[in-house]
Image (cartoon, rainbow, N blue to C red):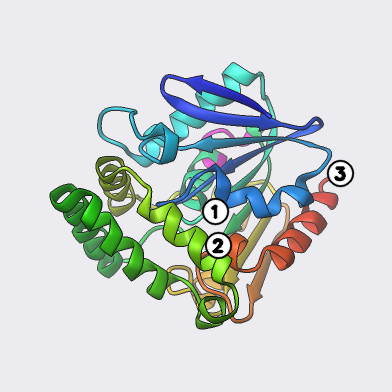
Amino acid sequence: MTLHVFDRVVVEEEGEGDAIVCVHGLGGSTNTFTPLMPALARHRVIRVDMPGSARSHRVEGPLTIERFVETLLSVCTRLGVTRAHWIGHSLGTIVCQHLAVAAPKLVRSVALFGPLIAPPEAARTAIRARAAKARAEGTSGMHEIALGLVNAAISADTRQRLPVALAYVRESLMRQDADGYARTCDALAEAAAAAVERIEAPVLLVTGDEDGVAPPQAVRAFAERLHSAKSSRVVVLPRCGHWTPIERPEECSRELRDFLAQQR
């Protein structure tokens, strides 16, 4: 694995072959996609700690979806990537959608886990409240945010049967820099919907039947809007919440492996 740092943004690169770029969500990191790495063998995998998150928390200034897209385009330019498969989780799925619309020639396919086009208004209010708590309370606030989200965003089955998955999600959230997390919350709270009707690449949408952020009915409605996509497929995983790659890595890997094989 090669570690790059571009303008305080940390990027991991490993493997050879067709490029894949992985974009994590709010409270995530490059490790969100570690369980999927076996499915990405024989690819050049580029994983980014997004500005404001994990090791890239020292990136300064306001964060927006547009800035996230610009960061990814810059990473691709620096690494000589002219065409790639894109994998996103949660907030990262919104970023991937905007990038697929803005730079269609760069996008070979799009696989989205816990996908949403934009947060509903009630969710935006809750996200802004989380940002305020992180800013005001720092480490203790992030501790409470992590505990709350573990209970709300992970399925009951995962909490009972998979303590390692539970621990990973808690650790990923708890270890975020409070200011960086708050600024990332700002980006998500203000996120506008991309013109998904214009996405041309094949699209895979994977959610859990207990995902309150990306509920199955919303994901199916999302798929119905992909009028220009070469193909689209919706997968709903049973007894699974919002952290699909962490909660159901084998099922997600299988779907991703099959999807990528179809793009050859």
Question: Is residue 126 located in the magenta-colored stretch of the structure?
Answer: no
Which of the two labelled residues, at mark 2 and mark 3, occupies the earlier sequence position? 2
Q: Nearer the viewer, residue 201 or 149?
A: 149
Numbered circle sitting on residue 197: 1
Residue 36 to residue 56: above or below: below
Which residue is rendered at x = 55% and y = 29% of the image? 11
Q: Nearer the viewer, residue 243 or 115?
A: 243
Q: Position of residue 119 (x, y in %)?
A: 36, 61
Task: Determine whether, in the image, residue 168 is placed left or right of residue 186.
Answer: right
Task: Determine whether, in the image, residue 197 is placed left or right of residue 41.
Answer: left
Identified by mark 1, the residue type is Glu
- Give me the C-alpha separation between circle 1 and circle 3: 24 Å
Query: How many numbered tags mark residues here?
Result: 3
Q: Position of residue 155 (x, y in %)?
A: 51, 78
What's drawn in magenta, residue-wise?
100-104
Mark 2 or mark 3, whichever is nearer to me: 3
Q: Nearer the viewer, residue 102 or 213?
A: 213
Q: Quadrant of residue 13?
A: top right
Numbered circle sitting on residue 55: none
- Give me the C-alpha separation between circle 2 and circle 3: 25 Å
Mark 2 lies on residue: 225
Query: Which SS class for mark 2?
Result: loop
**Residue at the far left in the pictured view:** 136
Q: Does the rendering let one see residue 229?
A: no
Look at the magenta stretch and give its main secondary structure.
helix
Which residue is rendered at x = 54% and y = 53% of the image? 197
Identified by mark 3, the residue type is Arg
Task: Check contact, mark 1 vs mark 2: CB within 8 A.
Answer: yes
Mark 3 surroundings within 10 Å by alpha-carbon count, few (fewer than 14), some (14 through 19), many (20 or more): few
Q: Position of residue 134 (x, y in %)?
A: 22, 52
Mark 3 lies on residue: 264
